[in-house]
Amino acid sequence: MTSYAVVIPTLARDTLADCLAALAAATGPRPEQIVLVDDRPGPEAEAGALEYPLGVLGDLRARTVVLHSGGRGPAAARNTGLRAVTAPWTAFLDDDVQVGPHWCDQLVQDLAEAAPDTGAVQGVIAVPLPGERRPTDWERATAGLARARWITADMAYRTEALKQVGGFDERFTRAFREDADLALRVLAAGWRIRQGRRTTRHPVRPASRWVSLTQQRGNADDALMRRLHGPDWWEKAVAPRGRIRRHAAVTAAAAAALALAAAGRPRAAAL
């Protein structure tokens, strides 16, 4: 039987209990280890905050270890978890997902069917959206995870492949592009990545009305991807370019309007 470990980075959000409960309830061969990595900074990372969510694991609690990564972001948290793994496969889950009822069975089948040159097997992500109204921007953005390549919401890597490429690049301090960067390096090392059949549910977390603005910080990660993988990284990573050209045009127009207004040309600025 193919053995595996599960690594879950967390900020001790309310979603963690549901994530662990779903994992504990899933049928099939149990994980050899569960490595829960608390990525809250400094004094916030108190073991007491995780007592309740850990309690839902039942008999899996004995196989679970809690580590701390000091608030350095999900890439560093996953590397912290990876260093504790001894199993041949490492399955990464986010703390806001809920694996399907037969996830353990399906995962082991996915891994058993992996060819020797397969370095990773991705899970199938389902994002439930409201049916009675139009989805918000945030809900649509989350729904995009169902079509995304290589996302670590549910991604199983050969531990050997991860260690060969040095794990996640910790310069990616947000949950954005660190998964694509890792996948591109694993592919460049000669491994293949394929789609599995196991399913995981990714509910939409509550978010403020300004969440779309805060998400724009990910543009810095796009710049890092260009530096690491070249100007064609979008095609390599099969990543949508979104509306970056339109945003650039709007920004340029705004800058020109300000410059014209400062030069005493209000009509041209208004135009």
Image (tube, rainbow, N blue to C red):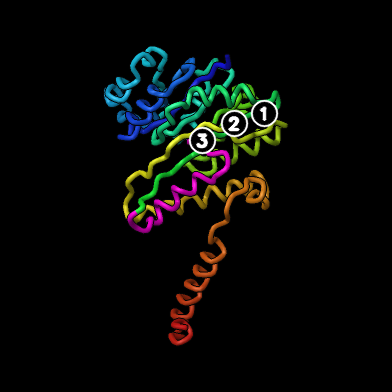
Nearest to viewer (mark 3 / mark 1): 1
The residue sitting at 61% across, 37% down in the picture is 183
Mark 3, secondary structure of its residue: loop
* Quadrant for the N terminus in the image: top right
The residue sitting at 64% across, 28% down in the picture is 119
Other residues around mark 2 within 10 Å, as few (<14) / some (14–19) / many (≥20) = many
Q: Which residue is mark 3?
A: 152
Mark 1, secondary structure of its residue: strand
Upstream in sequence: badge 3 or badge 1: 1
Farthest right residue in view: 190
Q: Can the viewer see residue 41?
A: no
Nearest to viewer (mark 2 / mark 3): 2
| Amino acid type, callout 1 | Thr
Q: Position of residue 90 (x, y in %)?
A: 54, 24
Give the magenta range. Answer: 132-153
**Residue 141 lies within the magenta run:** yes
Q: Quadrant of residue 133?
A: bottom left
CA distance for labels 2 and 3: 11 Å
Q: Which residue is mark 2?
A: 121
Upstream in sequence: badge 2 or badge 3: 2
Are the residues flagged by discs 2 and 1 in contact, CB closer than 8 Å? Answer: yes
Other residues around mark 1 within 10 Å, as few (<14) / some (14–19) / many (≥20) = some
The disc label shown at residue 118, or none = 1
Q: Position of residue 52 (x, y in %)?
A: 27, 24
Are the residues flagged by discs 2 and 3 in contact, CB closer than 8 Å? Answer: no
The residue sitting at 63% across, 51% down in the picture is 234
Other residues around mark 3 within 10 Å, as few (<14) / some (14–19) / many (≥20) = many
